[in-house]
């Protein structure tokens, strides 16, 4: 099945099995391995991507559902070598430990800040409640998102 | 081996697909279906029935009012319902439940119709909808029928849809005089918890603290939502006090039929679901 969508700002047409999961399409077919698969059942948020600007779990979507949509993955956030403000905030606040949850956390943070540019710490915690970090580093992740919000408002 | 995935844009397109291919697997948000597909063994060769994704059908999305009723179309996502001002104003019990359902990602994907048709004993949207006396509308290519949600849910994973029918929407009466909307879910964590037990309650409490009307529903403690007119009748007309609630607790215990599973034992479920009744005390001086 041929599907067309916009991937990280570029039009893309690709021939895939319609029932392939989006996470597999991204990682195995398009070799965008930034998006991670943790649980494969919607509980960990590691595979979060943006579809038309809103967070979705790529392990719970089939490739056919991308038809006509705008997709952003972690690879699409930086502009050349310039990191996205959220990525920069994660680096500067030490919010990355093993890094496995990071792409999902960063995409989720971008989604949170797009809807709520100035979230409270509670709102941030609620916003990332669907993303697990097993290094248990939530404190610094929340710090980073708070920092990114301030950075953006500056 | 690959399965066809169809994305109809209109209800008419859907009826045509039904006509051509009666053996279909419908899905909306996919948050349950994709987990199930993954745990299944690889499909045998041959042509498996196509999957039909309903997310692109505009006629199945959105919330509208008609004759004093609010209709939530089946493929409206949990996030969209949570944001809706009419729902917030008239059915705060539903907004509360949705804020505890899954996670932000799951709420962006999952739909109310999907939650109902999955008919899980732990389905979060079911208890508030039972207390609100919701009805559901099923539609096929040439007819529609309305029935109480209670008769639509037949048992775990089973609903009263016939071949060629889909769940079109959920109808809730806008005017009710319940001034207390309560929901609590017991899970192993706050987000992404499949309920071990839950209770939704609507109460009309008089200025003097008398329970003039009450509706209660428990989730995850029976094959479907547990309701009991005996308990509601026992509490009606009584003051909202600890003694009154404690007197009703044995009735709750009797009304539930929980099971042991990976999340909790039947005994714990029965105990905690019964204790949830005492939470209503927080509204004593409301």
Image (cartoon, coloured by chain):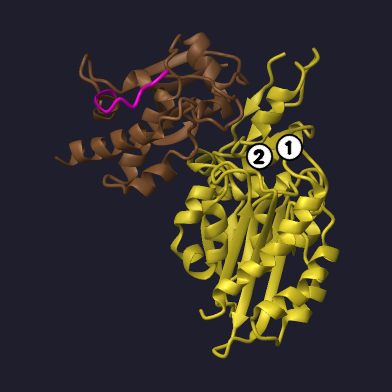
Chain colours: A brown, B yellow
- The answer to whether residue B237 of the structure is visible from this angle is yes
The residue segment tinted magenta is: A91-98
The residue carrying mark 2 is B14
Decide: marks 2, 1 in contact (CB < 8 A)? yes
Check if residue A95 falls in the magenta segment: yes
> What residue lies at 76% left-to-right and 58% top-to-bottom?
B271
Of helix, strand and loop, which one carries label 1? helix
Q: Nearer the viewer, residue A18 or B114?
A: B114
Query: Does B136 appear above or below B206?
Result: above
Mark 1 = which residue? Answer: B18
Q: Position of residue A29 (x, y in %)?
A: 51, 9
**Relative image position of residue A51 (x, y in whole percent):** 43, 32
- Mark carried by residue B89: none
Circle count: 2
Q: Residue at x 59, y 66 (%)?
A: B182
Letter of the chain that mark 1 sits on in the rendering: B
Q: Residue furthest left?
A: A154
Whether residue A148 is situated above or below residue B140 in the rendered picture = above
Q: Position of residue A87 (x, y in %)?
A: 29, 25
Q: Is residue B69 visible?
A: no
**Would residue B194 be found to the left or right of residue A92 on screen?**
right
Specify few, some or many for label 1: CA neighbours under 10 Å numbering under 14, 14-19, or 20 or more: some
Q: Crowding near pointer 2: few (<14 within 10 Å), some, many (20+)?
A: many
- SS at circle 2: helix
The reply to the same-chain question for discs 2 and 1 is yes
Quadrant in the picture for residue A88? top left
Q: Residue at x 28, y 30 (%)?
A: A86
Q: Main secondary structure of the magenta part?
A: loop
| Depicted A79 relative to depicted A144: above or below | above
Residue drawn at x 47%, y 28% as measured from the top left:
A133
Left or right of A127 in this view: B197: right
């Amino acid at each position: 099945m041929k599907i067309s969508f916009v991937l990280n700002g570029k039009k893309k047409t690709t021939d895939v099995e319609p029932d392939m999961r989006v996470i597999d399409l991204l990682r195995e077919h398009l070799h965008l391995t930034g998006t991670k698969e943790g649980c494969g059942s919607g509980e960990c948020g590691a595979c979060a991507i943006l579809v038309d600007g809103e967070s979705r779990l790529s392990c719970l979507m089939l490739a056919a559902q991308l038809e006509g949509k705008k997709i952003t993955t972690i690879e699409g956030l930086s502009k050349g070598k310039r990191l996205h403000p959220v990525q920069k905030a994660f680096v500067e606040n030490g919010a990355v430990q093993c890094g496995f949850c990071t792409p999902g956390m960063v995409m989720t943070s971008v989604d949170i800040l797009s809807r709520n540019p100035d979230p409270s710490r509670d709102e941030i915690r609620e916003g990332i409640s669907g993303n697990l970090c097993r290094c248990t580093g939530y404190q610094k992740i929340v710090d980073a998102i708070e920092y990114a919000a301030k950075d953006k408002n500056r | 081996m690959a399965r066809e995935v169809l994305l109809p844009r209109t209800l008419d397109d859907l009826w045509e697909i039904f006509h051509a291919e009666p053996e279909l697997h419908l899905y909306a948000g996919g948050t349950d279906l994709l987990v199930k597909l993954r745990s299944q063994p690889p499909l045998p060769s041959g042509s498996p029935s196509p999957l039909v994704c309903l997310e692109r059908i505009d006629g199945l999305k959105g919330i509208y009012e008609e004759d004093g009723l609010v209709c939530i179309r089946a493929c409206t996502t949990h996030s969209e319902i949570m944001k809706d001002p009419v729902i917030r104003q008239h059915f705060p019990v539903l907004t509360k439940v949705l804020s505890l359902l899954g996670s932000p990602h799951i709420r962006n994907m999952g739909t109310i119709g999907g939650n109902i048709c999955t008919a899980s004993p732990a389905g979060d949207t079911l208890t508030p909808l039972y207390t609100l006396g919701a009805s559901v509308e099923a539609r096929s290519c040439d007819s529609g029928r309305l029935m109480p949600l209670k008769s639509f849910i037949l048992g775990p994973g089973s609903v009263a849809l016939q071949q060629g029918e889909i769940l079109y929407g959920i109808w809730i009466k806008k005017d009710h005089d319940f001034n207390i909307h309560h929901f609590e879910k017991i899970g192993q964590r706050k987000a992404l918890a499949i309920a071990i037990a839950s209770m939704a309650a609507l109460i009309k409490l008089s200025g003097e603290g008398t329970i003039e009307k009450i509706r209660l529903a428990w989730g995850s403690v029976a094959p479907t939502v547990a309701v009991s007119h005996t308990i509601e009748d026992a509490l009606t007309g009584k003051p909202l006090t600890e003694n009154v609630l404690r007197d009703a607790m044995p009735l709750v215990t009797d009304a539930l039929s929980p099971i042991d599973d990976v999340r909790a034992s039947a005994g714990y479920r029965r105990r905690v679901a019964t204790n949830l009744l005492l939470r209503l005390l927080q509204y004593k001086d409301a």
